[in-house]
Image (cartoon, rainbow, N blue to C red):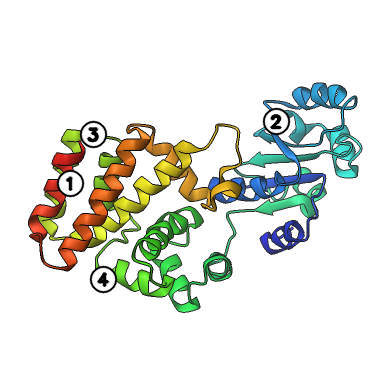
Amino acid sequence: MTLYELDSKLKAGIIDKLYIFVGNETFLMNTYIDKMCSTLKKRHVDCLSDIHKSLRCLRLINEYYTYVIKDDENYLSDEDLWKGFISGREQGRHSTVFIYRNLDKRSKFYKQHKNFIVDFDEITRESIAKALIDNYNLSEKNSLELVDMCGKSYDKTLFEFNKVYELASADNIDIDKAFKLAKKDNLLCPNNLSDVFKFIDAVCKRHKEKSYIEYELLRQKEDNPIGVLSLLYMNIKNMLVVNSCPPNENIADKTGLTTWQIKVAHEKGRNYTSKELVGIMKLISELEEKLKLNEVDMKLAIPYLLIKTL
């Protein structure tokens, strides 16, 4: 099964009973598993016996699940089980996703499961670019350029595109203009985490000493403070939105944030109260306005923010 076929089926609301996901693009795998779970609940299990125990219990209630199991060696070697899962007899009305880092294409297992295997390591630059074009309206030219900058890695491309998306939202500009601006201001750094995002990460995690160290690196590079403040604003705003949602709520449906934005916001932790986050957003907005009106020295804006925030 190709990635395109998987995507088309899920968009049509069709969920198969068996999937074999292969490769290292875990973020992309999880994105598709989350799509399945908009219809079926997700349940991670450690081994096949856990699935069987759960299925026996669920026969008594009207709930259906997508079971996710990683690197299960028993299934690889038990040909009797293959027949049950391929036919769907074992799962009943549930769905099962087996995840493996790699499989031998010459093996009997691979040949028997060929129609159920989705290889996430054979994603083309065009298919990654198409995801940006279809979901975010980034032009084909800019999408392909970003994919190439990121070494054709889906995870890296999404990570870097998140900067573009946040810049577009913060400055209320279209996505292609934000891409060009991010390139111009050196905000895109695919081969390693950019100094800008190291700084933002330190501030969001309330690491005072590290924030000043990272700011000094930014100062030496003479990065545009308005671009840095815009990206910090969006990160703070996402933290506020995510931290305000109840634990068991579907945050993406409730807030409109992407899976990646929610993941990044969670990783920042809860280092500020909601009142403090609102205060930081107000302060950043005031500084951005004063910078645009030349009422604040470019070199003083971020140090002032750090003094008031940390």
Q: Is residue 125 visible?
A: yes
Q: Which residue is mark 2?
A: 73
Q: CA distance from mark 4 to mark 1?
A: 24 Å
Of badges 4 and 1, the one in the foreground is 1
Q: Residue at horizontal 81%, vertical 36%? A: 64
The N terminus sits in image quarter: bottom right
Given the image, on which type of amino acid does mark 3 rest?
His
Q: Is residue 24 visible?
A: no
User: Mark 4 or mark 2: which comes first in sequence?
Assistant: 2
Horizontally, residue 59 falls left or right of residue 183, namely right
Query: How far across and down, in percent of the image, does residue 129 sit?
Result: 52, 68
Q: Which residue is mark 3?
A: 207
Horizontally, residue 45 falls left or right of residue 306, namely right
User: Mark 2 or mark 1: which comes first in sequence?
Assistant: 2
Mark sitting on residue 184: 4
Q: Which residue is mark 1?
A: 305
Quadrant of the image occupied by residue 186: bottom left
Marks 4 and 2: CB-CB under 8 Å? no
Q: Nearer the viewer, residue 234 or 117?
A: 234
Q: Nearer the viewer, residue 290 or 112?
A: 290
Of badges 3 and 1, the one in the foreground is 1
Q: Secondary structure at mark 3?
A: loop
